[in-house]
Structure formats: C-alpha cells, structure tokens
Amino acid sequence: MTWWKIVLIYASVLALVLLAARFPHSWWSVTLRQSYGIRPTGPYGTFSRRDFLHGAVWALAIAIVSLMVVVVAFSIADRFPFNSRGEQIGQAYGFMFFIFTGMATLALCILLFHALRAHSYPDYPFAITAFGEIIGYSTLENVDLQGRVVWGRFVPSDTYTKAASVVEGADNESVERYVSERDALGLGVLSRAGQVISARAVRIAHFSAEGGEAACKVEVILDDVAAWQAALTEAEEMVIPGRGTDGA
C-alpha cells in the first residue's frame, strides 16, 4: 500500500470522527454511535464534560502507545541493511503509527477544547433539532393523543438563528417555497434522555417579531403515540417541565 493511500485512510477516519462531533444529532452521527455502542451521558443525547474528559484520557493513552510503537518500529528498521525489506517494513509501520500518534494528539486537543467549552442545558423535557443541532426547547405541554398532535411554547437556543429566516419568513413567502425550505431544515424532536421522538412532521410557528419567545410555538405530529408516552414519562422523571430558562 502506497503512502498516499495510508494518509487518505487515516484522514477519512479523522474527518468522519470530526463531523460526528460537530453534528451530534445528525442521523449518521447517531448511527455511528449506535454501531459502536457509544451512549453520551449529557442531556438530549449530547456529550457532557465527563464524556469529553473520558475520551481525552483514551486519546492520550492511544497517543502514548502509538508513539512507543513508532520508536520501536524505527529502532528495528535501523538494524536492517539500507533499503532492505526489513528496513522498509519497519519504516512503514513507524510511519503509519506516527500518523496515528498525530491523529490521537489532535483528538486529545479537540476533546479538551470541547470539555472546556461544555455548558449546561435548560431543564426542558424536549429539544427541537435542525441541521443536526439543537435550535430550541419545549415542554410540549398540550397533548391531543386522539389527533396524534402535541404542541407547546418554543424557547429558541443560540443556534436558532440558523432556522429563523425560514420560520419567521413564512408569512412573506409562497406556501410551496416555505414548505420546501421547512422540510430542508430536517426538524426533529429529542427527549432529554436523548431518545429520538418518531414524528411525521414538526412545525415551528412564529407569530410576530415583537413577541419574542412567547410568540413562538412548536407543533409535533406523532408517528407512534406509545413511544411518545414512554418518552414523556422518562423525560418528566429527569426534569421539572418548564423550569429552565437558560439559553444553550
């Protein structure tokens, strides 16, 4: 295997890990975590400071072990004649684990950075997601199980601005364009335990620019009522609904 193929493989793995960390609520990030049995301990399925520090410890351990392999591999390679097969194999392993050491070190720095920036979340039973990120919260205090609809006040997070132009521009755009842009948001609902709420549709209504948070509501058309009731029970055991007011 040539050097550029080795570098490409390691770069692809690193890119996948970084994308999963950047968009933790996207379907491919959730699928990746489920495939390897990774379960974040933070609210709404997010990684907590403890998770990041735990990962940093593993990254440090991998970096140390990889560096030791690099030293051993190059030491063994030096014992063989120049340009011999033994030297080439030793240098190849040394180079591969050198790249692996660099990746582990980079992961360590990223994990420590995220651990320092980790913050608390408001105590709402449910989070609304778009583009693979949390854009707001709600207690979804109004329930119509017969109609398979739940709704409640929508409390925007700091990242809501990414979706605000679509939600707040609903009155000024054609219905077809609004529906198309809304569907492109990929709106979803997460319980505080990190469970994805199966929904046929999620809509955010913005009534006026002057109304602030009170002028926003979110409506969820449920796909599975039984799953919703189970998620609601679990969420209510974790928080006092509507108590939180802090932004994300």
Image: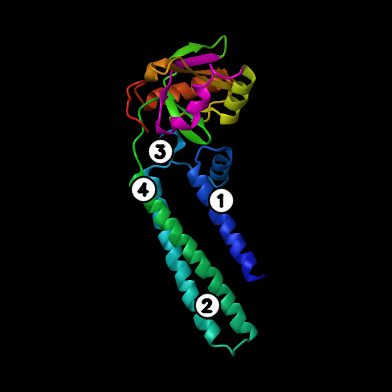
Q: Give the spatial CA distance, label 2 vs label 4.
A: 34 Å
Which amino acid type corresponds to the residue marked 4 in the rendered image? Ala
The magenta-colored residue range is 149-174
Which amino acid type corresponds to the residue marked 2 in the rendered image? Ala
The x, y position of residue 11, in whole percent, is 57, 59
Give the mark, 2 or 4, whose residue is nearer the N terminus.
2
Residue 16's tag is 1
Residue 153 sits inside the magenta stretch: yes
Which amino acid type corresponds to the residue marked 3 in the rendered image? Gly
Q: Give the spatial CA distance, label 1 vs label 3.
A: 21 Å
Question: Residue reaching furthest front?
Answer: 172
Eye-nearest disc, 2 or 1: 1
Judging depth in this view, the residue of 127 and 228 nearest the camera is 127
Judging depth in this view, the residue of 131 and 190 nearest the camera is 131
Q: Which residue is mark 4?
A: 115
Q: Give the spatial CA distance, label 1 vs label 4.
A: 20 Å
- For residue 193, say whether it is visible: no
- For residue 212, say whether it is visible: yes
